[in-house]
Amino acid sequence: MHKNGFFPDNFVIPNVLKDCSALQLIGFGKGVHGYALKMELYDCVYVASSLVDMYGKCGSLVDARKIFDGIYERNVVTWNSMIVGYVQNRINEEAMKVFYDMIVEGVEPTRVTLPSFLSASVNLDAIEEGRQGHAVIVLRGLELDNILGNSLINFYSKTHEIEDIEFILSRIKERDTVSWNLLISCYVQEGQVEEALDTCRRMRSENFRLTQFQLLYYVHLMRKEGIKPEASSAFTGVLSACSHRRFLDEGLEVFSDMVSGYSIKLNMEH
């Protein structure tokens, strides 16, 4: 670009910094930062926000915060970049402080802000704060997509409130495997075998394949309830659990997946 007489502007630099973030090229990102200063593009909120994002995602939170504090007029992207950077680096207390500062400044959280805030709440076991995040989602009338919905399910899994989790799952527009996995995890933690099996059945009815995640959790459930697996294989554990609980149909479904879906060779253990 330089060789041809073209110089990156405030539209090009954010895209370059985005690539630096994705590839963890903090050295190159610092070079871009220096270029932005030289070309007097530093005052552009889009460039500055991209720098906050790049430094945050590359783990240099001191630099990210320095730039963040120096931005005169922050937009929602700036706030989100700082919060996400803190959460990704497990500096959860600071993430929550920035979130509340954002509210005080009159900037409305978005569906990018709230999953990060909920993650910070989970990491800190901050139940009341997580409920406040849920309240913001409701008050803003945000539709639950996979990311936002799964963040809520993950939060409520820490509070062991199964009914809330089931309600949230029902409100997610397009459920994915993560959504189902989180619910199964909650059932397993609470020792609700029948509900966990029923959830797998519902997954199959919506054309989701039974994953190794669910299978391993059944083995975990058996151990939790004092049921000794007959073999180390997750499939064997599931079949044993189904047999113990007299869930013949579910056991046959898992058996079918072993043979046709996963091409597992059968032996006497199965």
Image (tube, rainbow, N blue to C red):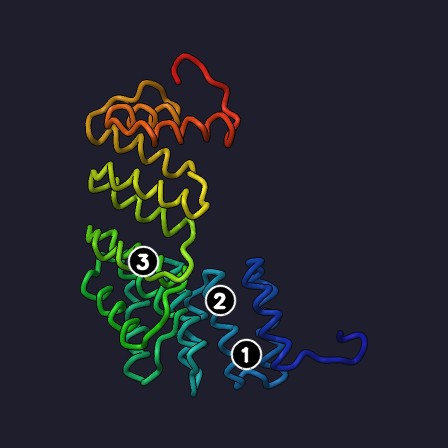
Q: Earlier in the sequence, mark 1 or mark 3?
A: 1
Q: Which quarter of the rendering shows the N terminus?
A: bottom right
Q: Nearer the viewer, mark 2 or mark 3?
A: 3
Helix, strand, or loop for circle 2? helix
- Residue at 42% x, 83% y: name it: 74
Q: CA distance from mark 2 to mark 3?
A: 38 Å
Q: Is residue 155 above or below residue 31?
A: above
Q: Give the CA distance from mark 1 to mark 3.
A: 40 Å
Q: Could you say which disc has been placed on residue 55 in the image?
A: 2
Q: Amino acid at mark 3?
A: Ser
Query: Quadrant of the image for the C terminus?
Result: top left
Is residue 18 or residue 268 the one in the foreground? Answer: 268
Classify 10 Å Cα crowding around label 3: few (below 14), some (14-19), many (20 and above).
Answer: few
* Residue pictured at 32% horizontal, 58% vertical: 170
Tell me where residue 24 appears, x and y as whole percent.
Answer: 55, 58
Tell me where residue 203 appears, x and y as whole percent.
39, 45
> Which residue position is annotated with label 3?
170
Of marks 1 and 2, the one in the foreground: 1
Q: Determine which residue is flagged by label 1.
A: 47
Amino acid, disc 2: Tyr
